[in-house]
């Protein structure tokens, strides 16, 4: 993860631990420093893992139906919206209301899936494949004639490795029990989510917004920009890469006053 203010502040708190230990200050000071270190680290971890959680929650909601419909479908089946998305649709975080959508969650653990993508016959189309990190793995459609209509094989990574021992505290298939943690560490972890949600609600940590406009151009290709990745998971799950679509957005004017529709 790239260095940012939270990491710097955490590093400062970590340095404080060394100082208080050297000067033999009261034990409570060390506990407070340990709590602050955990708080900033927990914010980083919360942001890092947020796309996985919000995508899986969306999967659970969107696939909890017996048959495929316009706005939801079982695993390995498409939902096909026949008209514009209703304004009060909340199963997925904000989506474009002036596009027609079809989407599916596919299970690749047993075998690959073949998806047939039809020719749009002059209508601009985009067929994008995302992983649970919200990375756009591949895009087909009218922008790329050689990757337009056809059959697409979608396969999972097929990784068979073994995770390192004693290196991760939250493991696949195992419950995370914070009650077993040190009290100061637990307090730092518990305080972090509220701060992250506040930052999501007010925009990415390092967002530039000239004249009130925001236009993130690394969507779908985040690399190590975990903050923007988490924010897009919060605001625009399933968003495409800039080659296909851009999302200029404004909530305030050039003087930082909230837009009121006047």
Image: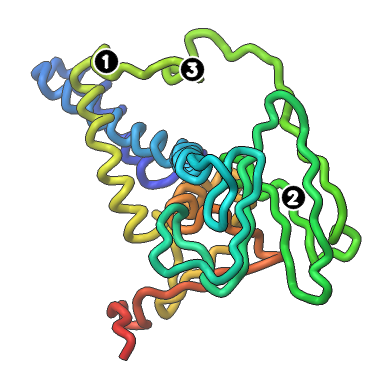
Across and down, in percent, residue 36 comes to 24, 32
Q: Residue furthest bottom?
A: 262
Residue 206 falls in image quadrant: bottom left
On the picture, is 120 further left or further right than 84? right
Residue that appears at 59% across and 48% down: 68
Above or below: residue 82 compared with residue 218: below
Position of the C terminus by quadrant:
bottom left
On the picture, is 180 further left or further right than 50? left
Residue that numbered label 2 is attached to: 138
Q: Earlier in the sequence, mark 3 or mark 1?
A: 3
Residue that numbered label 3 is attached to: 173
Across and down, in percent, residue 98 comes to 56, 74
Above or below: residue 125 compared with residue 111: below
Label 3 SS: loop
Across and down, in percent, residue 107 comes to 65, 33
Q: Nearer the viewer, residue 192 or 24?
A: 192
Q: Residue furthest front?
A: 67
Residue that appears at 55% across and 69% down: 247
Residue that numbered label 1 is attached to: 181
Q: Earlier in the sequence, mark 2 or mark 1?
A: 2
In three-dimensional space, the C-alpha distance between marks 3 and 1, rounded to whole angstroms, equals 19 Å
In three-dimensional space, the C-alpha distance between marks 2 and 1, rounded to whole angstroms, equals 41 Å
Label 1 SS: loop
Is residue 48 visible to the viewer in this orientation of the structure?
Answer: no
Is residue 201 visible to the viewer in this orientation of the structure?
Answer: yes
Q: Residue furthest right?
A: 146
């Amino acid at each position: 993860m790239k260095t940012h203010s939270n990491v710097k502040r955490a590093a400062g708190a970590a340095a404080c631990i060394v100082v208080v230990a050297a000067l033999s200050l009261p034990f409570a000071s060390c506990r407070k420093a340990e709590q602050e270190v955990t708080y900033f680290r927990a914010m980083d971890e919360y942001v890092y893992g947020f796309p996985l959680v919000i995508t899986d929650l969306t999967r659970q909601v969107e696939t909890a139906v017996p048959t495929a419909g316009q706005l939801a479908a079982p695993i390995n089946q498409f939902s096909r919206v026949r008209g514009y998305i209703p304004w009060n649709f909340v199963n997925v975080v904000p989506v474009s209301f002036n596009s027609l959508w079809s989407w599916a969650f596919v299970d690749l653990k047993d075998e690959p899936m073949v998806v047939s993508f039809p020719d749009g016959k002059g209508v601009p189309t985009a067929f994008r494949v995302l992983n649970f990190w919200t990375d756009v793995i591949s895009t087909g459609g009218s922008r790329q004639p050689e990757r337009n209509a056809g059959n697409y094989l979608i396969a999972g990574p097929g990784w068979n490795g073994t995770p390192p021992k004693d290196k991760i505290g939250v493991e696949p298939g195992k419950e995370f029990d914070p009650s077993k943690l040190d009290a100061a560490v637990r307090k730092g972890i518990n305080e972090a989510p509220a701060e992250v949600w506040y930052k999501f609600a007010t925009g990415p940590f390092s967002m530039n917004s000239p004249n009130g406009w925001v236009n993130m151009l690394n969507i779908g290709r985040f690399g190590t920009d975990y903050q923007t990745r988490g924010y897009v998971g919060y605001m625009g799950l399933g968003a495409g890469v800039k080659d296909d679509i851009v999302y200029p957005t404004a909530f305030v004017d050039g003087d930082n006053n909230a837009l009121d529709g006047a």
